[in-house]
Amino acid sequence: MQEHTRPPTQMAKGICLIIIACFFNAIQAFCVKLSAESISTLALVPIRTGFNFLLLLGYFLIKHRTKFRLRQLFSTKRIGMHVIRAITGMLALYLYFLAVVY
């Protein structure tokens, strides 16, 4: 088995990013639990997906503003695989939200 070595600064950055991701995952679960009384779980999935899409689109617009082309960002040769990934991802997110609510 091949070992990969990383500089200590990259390891520290990776650890910090994992901790931040866990924190935001806990916040998301908390928000899902609170909103479950007034919003159905089926409605929460597109809300969360749309919110994350807007965040990522904003990131790409800011980071790549000089060389950013929307057509290039969404161009792919494997559209079928992306559709399968989107469907399974939405199903997994729906089941995760159901598990948090109940």
Image: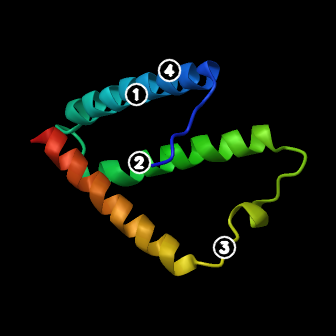
Q: Position of residue 24 (x, y in %)?
A: 40, 28
Three-letter amino acid code of the residue under disc 3: Thr
Q: Name the residue beneath numbered marker 4.
A: 16
Q: Name the residue beneath numbered marker 3.
A: 76
Looking at the rendered structure, the number of numbered marks drawn on it comes to: 4
Three-letter amino acid code of the residue under disc 1: Phe
User: Which comes before the other along the chain, label 3 or label 2?
Assistant: 2
Measure the alpha-carbon separation of dots 3 and 1.
30 Å
User: Which comes before the other along the chain, label 4 or label 2?
Assistant: 4
Q: Quadrant of residue 72?
A: bottom right
> Which type of secondary structure does the marked residue at label 2 adopt?
helix
Three-letter amino acid code of the residue under disc 2: Ile
Q: Name the residue beneath numbered marker 2.
A: 47
* 23 versus 2 height, above or below: above
Residue at 40% across, 54% down = 46
> Which type of secondary structure does the marked residue at label 3 adopt?
loop
- Tell me the crowding category of disc 2: few under 14, some 14 to 19, or many 20 or more residues within 10 angstroms, Cα based: few
Measure the alpha-carbon separation of dots 4 and 2.
27 Å
> Which type of secondary structure does the marked residue at label 1 adopt?
helix
Q: Depth check: 11 or 46 in front? A: 11
Three-letter amino acid code of the residue under disc 4: Cys
Q: Position of residue 49 (x, y in %)?
A: 44, 50
User: Which comes before the other along the chain, label 4 or label 3?
Assistant: 4
Nearer the viewer's eye, disc 4 or disc 2? 4
- Tell me the crowding category of disc 1: few under 14, some 14 to 19, or many 20 or more residues within 10 angstroms, Cα based: few
- Tell me the crowding category of disc 3: few under 14, some 14 to 19, or many 20 or more residues within 10 angstroms, Cα based: few
In contact (CB < 8 Å): disc 1 and disc 4: no
In contact (CB < 8 Å): disc 4 and disc 3: no
Q: Name the residue beneath numbered marker 1.
A: 24
In contact (CB < 8 Å): disc 3 and disc 2: no
* 99 versus 90 height, above or below: above
